[in-house]
Image (cartoon, rainbow, N blue to C red):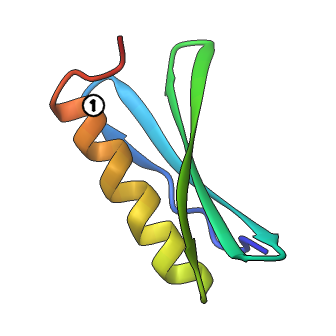
Amino acid sequence: MLEKQYTERVGEYIVTPLTKLTDAGIAASVSIRRGMYDRIFRFVPRFTCDIRAIQYALAQGRSMVQLNQLG
């Protein structure tokens, strides 16, 4: 589903949006990686197209890194 890589560097982190087709629409997730380890966050909203899901996941990932919300 995700053909082009939309990975973005935010500070020391690599933020990568992920999408998956579900019965309810397209689900968005984001991988936030630093070094060898990454965390995956899944989001509740469903989308009708990949690009909106990707944009949402990137925005959420950026926000989590910038606001230091990674725990």
- Residue most extreme to the bottom: 48
Query: Where is residue 70 shown, x and y percent of the image?
Result: 36, 19
Query: Where is residue 68 shown, x and y percent of the image?
Result: 21, 21
Q: Which residue appears at 45% of the width and 42% of the height? A: 15
When the figure is inspected, residue 19 is found, relative to residue 4, above or below; the finding is above
- Horizontally, residue 10 falls left or right of residue 44, namely left
Residue at disc 1, secondary structure:
helix
Quarter holding the C terminus?
Answer: top left
**Disc 1 crowd, CA 10 A, few/some/many (<14, 14-19, 20+):** some
Q: Which residue appears at 60% of the width and 63% of the height? A: 5
Q: Which residue appears at 37% of the width and 44% of the height? A: 61
Amino acid on which the number 1 mark rests in the picture: Val
- Horizontally, residue 30 falls left or right of residue 56, namely right
Question: Relative to the observer, which residue lies in front, 12 or 30?
Answer: 30
Question: Relative to the observer, which residue lies in front, 27 or 10?
Answer: 27
**Residue 64 found in image quarter:** top left
- Count how many numbered circles sit on residues in the image: 1
- Residue most extreme to the right: 23
When the figure is inspected, residue 18 is found, relative to residue 22, above or below; the finding is above
Query: Where is residue 2 shown, x and y percent of the image?
Result: 71, 70
- Residue most extreme to the left: 67
Residue position marked by numbered label 1 in the rendering: 65
Q: Which residue appears at 52% of the width and 71% of the height? A: 53
When the figure is inspected, residue 10 is found, relative to residue 23, above or below; the finding is above
**Residue 48 found in image quarter:** bottom right
- Horizontally, residue 17 falls left or right of residue 15, namely right
Question: Relative to the observer, which residue lies in front, 68 or 22?
Answer: 22
